Amino acid sequence: MGALSNLRVLDLTQVLAGPYCTMLLADMGADVVKIERPGGDLIRSNPPFVDDAEAEAYGGYFQSVNRGKRSIELDFGDDEDRADFLSLVETADIVVENYRAGTMEKYDLSYETLTEYNSDLIYSSIRGFGDPRTGETDRQGQPSFDLIAQALGGVMEITGQEDGPPTKTGPGVGDLFTATLNCIGILAAVNHREQTGEGQYVDTAMYDSMLSFTERAIYQQSYAGEAPTRRGNSHPTLFPYDAFETDDGYVVIAAFGTNHWREVCNAMGREDLAEEYPTAAERLEHREALREELVDWTAERTNDELIDTLEGRVPVAPVQTTEEIFEDPHVDARDMLVAVEQPGADRDVEIAGNPIKMSKTTPEPRGRAPLLDEHREDVLGEEADAEKPADD
């Protein structure tokens, strides 16, 4: 039993932001029914595959963010399928969609229409630029993806090397952070409904989410009156807080506290630097010269040597590859790699576990992602059973 095992979610989302949001709900025990357009979610066919894309039901992209859900295929342009969807709405707790603004209205399945069938429904949307219901702008209706959100929201401008171009982050934070915030909004709406009986509309825009994500750049602009830009792996107000090349890789050192700075200087055999630059402001002012001292020191040592020297005294870590992550005992102990079936392949695959840990109802992936329309009979049969009159 998960913490949300009393909730049913109708998941109309596809690609990444929406499916990640509903994946979090599924990991926490909600019954997530993925309602797919004819042909299924656009990312079912995206690589990678274990071996044979023709034999395997879907690739890793779809598997990762749709685990533990049930699938039915519906065409909202078909009267019978639309009626089936509305029958599901009547007993659902939450509907989540990530279409462009106006798409659900085209099928007469807007929030207002659905609340006629279920007055306390929680309806949640994830869009690039939000929904007119919560704040109308001229961008609404435009398509948006992670790259667009990162570009508009300032993420790319402050990411990358100082002499390099604006750079997106590796993970799709425009999708994933938006999805996480939307999940929080849904859970807040559930709590409100428990107290009042009222459902409501929840709306999270990718552009808005990236402004929240880049909060430091926002207050820097306001306080300093100038636009922050790229600084590589360094930090604008803390030093040392950076990545350093070693003899066989890279480590990160976050020694901005004076106690940490003294420990680094002791390890370097440069107690004089600790005496000469005792305050954070002085270290920040002379960061370039001090960074060169650190660069020279780290370059002569391996990752393991540096970690052994500083670990436990200074915040320090190697920059790990995914191969090293798979070998890290911490990851195993925390159940952060989960094996699931890959339909059509001759072995299981591993996907990222859930980082939320709870003493009673720890979230966890609840099986593989569904085959397209795999649960039609189960889901629609449950509705038919619910409509039958009780025996006298």
Image: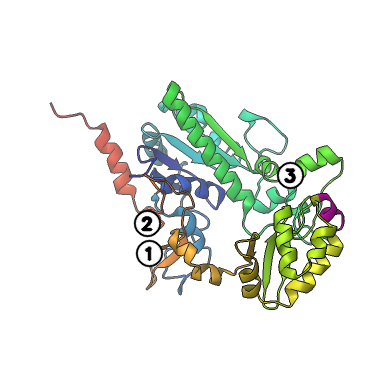
Q: Are marks 3 and 2 in contact (CB under 8 Å)?
A: no
Residue type at mark 3 is Arg
Q: Quadrant of the N terminus?
A: top left
Residue bounds of the magenta highlight: 281-286
**Could you tell me the amino acid type at mark 2?**
Gly
- Judging by the rendered image, the residue that carries numbered circle 2 is 367
Which picture quadrant has residue 140? top right
N-term-proximal mark, 2 vs 1: 1
Tell me the element at label 2.
loop
Residue pointed to by mark 1: 341
Which sits in the foreground, 311 or 74?
311
- Cα–Cα gap, marks 3 and 2: 38 Å
Against 385, residue 338 (above or below) is below
Magenta residue check for 77 = no
Residue on which the image places disc 3: 216
The answer to which of marks 3 and 2 sits earlier in the sequence is 3
